[in-house]
Every structure is written in structure tokens, then in C-alpha cells.
Amino acid sequence: MSEHIVLLYSDDPEVRDRMRLAIGTRPAADLTVRFVDASTYAEVVKLVDDTDVDLLVLDGEATPGGGLGIARQLKDEIADAPPVVLAIARAADRWLASYAKVEGTIMYPLDPVTTGETVAALLRAYPAIRR
């Protein structure tokens, strides 16, 4: 069983902690994850460039750099960008997530079952791209 690296982005450390708890280190019996944290857009870019990130979980409510904008920019600028899960507060924002080329969405408040299933499905569907 290989370990997957999941990047958690939010300007709020409590939100990142809730993401970490909702996903857990074993989102499925066959998957383990290690987390790396980013609180700014610059940190996200650096971690994506310098680390073999397998999945990004971005806070769509973060300020000043929201997860939607970060996702869209990464998808436009990096040919082999990792898949993205966007945490959103309103179901109506799913169309924005689609525009940003996001592979999955999860809703606040984060449900551990749904969040873990979403993360596990994407880790399985998108094999790790080692840079």
C-alpha cells in the first residue's frame, strides 16, 4: 500500500484541521495519506512544484486567494496538475467548480464519510504523476 500526499489549502488553520479530520490518514482500507498544509497561494504553488502531491483539497471560502481561483490557475498553467477537491459552502457553486476544472466537490460542513469517499475515489481514479 503506497502513501499518497494530499495538500490541504485554507487561510484558516482550523479549516485545514477539519479537512484533515474529515479525510483521515486512511480514507479507505487500501489507501493511506500524508498531509501537507498551505495557507497562501504561493505556498500551494511551491508545494505542487516541490512535492509529489497526489491530490489538492482547496477551501473555496478562503481569502484573499479562494480555492476556485487557485484551482483554475493551476489547471491552466500546469499540464499534469494533480486532481482537485474543492470545499464549498453552497451547492450552487458546483458550476463554478466545473468552470475551474475541479474534479470533485465537498460541502461544508464536511461530512467524514462523504469527504473520505470523494478523496479515495479521486486517488484511485487519477494515478500519481511523479514529477
Image: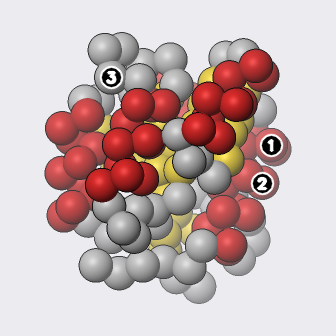
Mark 2, residues whose alpha carbon is within 10 Å: few (<14), some, or many (≥20)? some
Q: Which of marks 2 and 3 is nearer the N terminus?
A: 3
Assess disc 3: are there few (<14), some (14-19) or many (≥20) residues with their C-alpha within 10 Å of its C-alpha: some
Res 117 label: 2
Number of the front mark, 2 or 3: 3
Decide which of 34, 86 is in the foreground and name it. 86
Viewport quadrant of the N terminus: bottom right
In the rendered structure, the answer to whether residue 123 lies left or right of residue 14 reads right
| SS type, badge 3 | loop
**Residue lying furthest bottom in this view?**
1
Decide: few, some or many residues near mark 1? Use Cα within 10 Å; few <14, some 14-19, many ≥20.
some
Whether residue 60 sits left or right of residue 9 in the image: it is: right
Question: Which residue, given by chain and number where applicable, does mark 3 sit on?
Answer: 65
Q: Mark 1 points at which residue?
A: 114
Residue 28 falls in which quadrant of the image? bottom right
Report how far apart the C-alphas of labels 1 and 3 lie in the structure.
Answer: 25 Å
Q: Are marks 1 and 3 in contact (CB under 8 Å)?
A: no
Label 3 sits on what residue type? Gly
